[in-house]
Image (tube, rainbow, N blue to C red):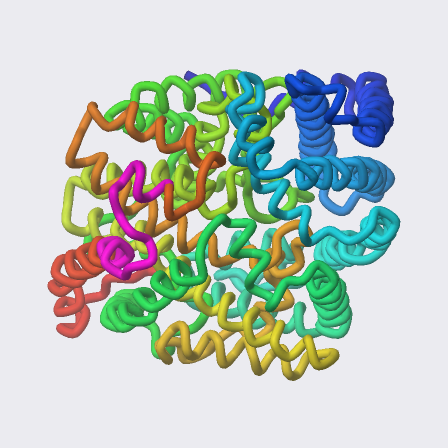
Amino acid sequence: MVYSQNWDLDSIFPGGIQSPQLADKYTTIQEQIKDFAQKVTTYNLSEDQQFNQLADLADLAQSIGAGLGTVNIFVNGLLSTDYGNSIYTPHLTKIGQLWVDFTNPLNQFQKVLRQFDDDTFAKIQKHERLAPIAFYLNELRDEAQRLLDDQTESLINKFALDGQNAWSQHYDTISASLKMTYTDANQQKHEISSGQALNMLDGEPNNNVRADIMKNYEAMWGQSENLTADTLNHLAGFRITNQRAHHYQDHLEQPLKMNRMKKETLDAMWSVVDRNKDMFKPYFDRKKSLLGLQEFGWQDQVAPITHIGDYHPKNISYDDAAKFIIENFAKFSPKMADFAKMAFENPWIESENRPNKQPGGYMESVPDLHESRIFLTYTGSVNDAATIAHELGHAFHSYQLTDLPFWRDAYAMNVAETASTFAELIVADANVQAAKTDAEKIVLLDAKMTNPIAMFLNIRARFLFEDAFYQERQKGIVLPERLNTLMDQAQKEAFADTLDTRHPHFWSSKLHFFIDSVPFYNFPYTFGYLFSAGIYAQAKAQGSDFEEQYIALLRDTANMTSEELAMKHLNVDLTQPEFWQSGADLVKKDIDEFLKLSEPFVKQTNAGMKIWEW
């Protein structure tokens, strides 16, 4: 089967950014928002004893939310494949304005919910049309106590367009304009974009080339540090002021609430991560030997082992990767396999490796069509195949909720990363199990380690940096030199001094620090990784009986807290370290196997046998 590597956006709105249907959708959403605002303002409980008008308001709000989600993925999808083109800026501004226009009456809707006494609200939650979204309605009602008066809320939302939202978009403008040069193995110089450089850092096999890219990448972001520092400071400043106005006690309270998790859960997770970080030291030492490095730098932590013994890994074609994913999904869930096949065939995936694409990858739902779109850049590596599986996991999660109301699709980011990481684990494990020789298994185990390195060490460093930065930002502007120091300290602590050279400007180069919609964007990834590891262990133990249990868990992700979800479907307490340790134990098992299998090859190297050819 030959699959297209370009996604289909025309089925959302034909004709690109000038699509008449897109323009019509903007108009429809505007009219719906006006209608919603009018009906919320005039809502009267005494005339709605059966709560049908309230249910109508909830339906209309969800229709508006779905429409905004649909236009957002369409415009951002076009932007992702034509990164930095200013033609899309007016549309991003328009979508932002529509969100502001919608937020004001939605705040009023929350205040309506707050006016009901507890007994009346209990009846509302049992209403036939409202029961499926009772948990979300309760969240809206609870958050209403933080809201300020309507005029002030409206003003804050309008300021956000040219404040927090604008600073986030400004970072994209900076990132898209950056270019750098590097020298390849043949001493030829090449100019590449920041996105291309990031992709090459993760996949370049030549030690010298990789080090040259890293040196120039760090320097490129260093030259832009004043711009990115201004952007980060002002984005964070707006957020801190907004949080204070809405009575949040500290900078972590809001992200924890958004992820529906307790501080005790976060602390338990990080305590296990810190307690287990030393297990990576022998892994890095061994990798340093296998790569033939004198020093082990930031760029080497996930560098691919491409030659060992007589084994020389080959690039995996996109079609072969798709086949492998579908086949191995089927071993755990035929429904996952059928879904993946549909996503490849339709096509919903943009994976072509070409210039002018946004770095990274993502999945976004298309709510009006009950579909998804996946964006990434496929270069043929094992890790790229795992990335496809990761994003398909996200999409499968969303697909399981298409028969439920839109607000039941509003699952938090931490559990969103669960389905994606579960899918990625399936493919990574299948790769290792399919290895025909020890050398091949070493290479594949090393590729599999990319995820735990990120989740235990890289994400931990991001959290430590961001936590320190927000504490200092409350006292004033944090200068670039201090940001570099905070990042370097965070990397030293998180990586337990295993890196000889680090990436002080990581705060500047990492998009996740500049996302406006989600504060502390990073820690949910570690949650999702370790949570999915527990789910994966149960899946292997239960075999084919696990599929329906897994789908039931996914369908509940926007219907309860993280702790309730884990207790109901896994019978575990997330505030205790035992569950998180079980995920760390799985990583330790892979490290031990990697060390055992690779030891003979290290001895060969020490005996003077040449393993590497660059």
User: Which residue shows up at 36% across the image and 27% down it?
Assistant: 551
- Measured from the top left, where is residue 389 in percent x and y? 40, 35
Q: Picture quarter containing residue 232?
A: bottom right
- Measured from the top left, where is residue 508 in percent x and y? 64, 67
- Measured from the top left, where is residue 558 in percent x and y? 49, 36
Height in image: 320 above or below 153? above
265 inside magenta stretch? no
- Measured from the top left, where is residue 340 in percent x and y? 42, 23
User: Which residue shows up at 55% across the image and 65% down it?
Assistant: 213
Viewer-side residue, 138 vs 304: 138
Relative to 214, 435 lies left or right: left
Q: Picture quarter containing residue 392?
A: top left
The C terminus, quarter of image: bottom left
User: Is residue 286 visible in the rendered structure shown here?
Assistant: no
Viewer-side residue, 537 vs 253: 253
User: Which residue shows up at 37% across the image and 28% down it?
Assistant: 320
Relative to 244, 332 lies left or right: left
Viewer-side residue, 69 vs 266: 266
User: Which residue shows up at 34% across the image and 78% down it?
Assistant: 294
Relative to 376, 247 lies left or right: right
Q: Of helix, strand and loop, which mostly describes the magenta segment?
A: helix
Magenta residues, start to end: 565-584
Viewer-side residue, 259 vs 315: 259
573 inside magenta stretch? yes
The N terminus, quarter of image: top left
Q: Picture quarter containing residue 335?
A: top left
Instruction: Please state the total of marks drawn on the protein image.
Output: 0
Height in image: 463 above or below 98? below
User: Is residue 9 visible in the rendered structure shown here?
Assistant: yes
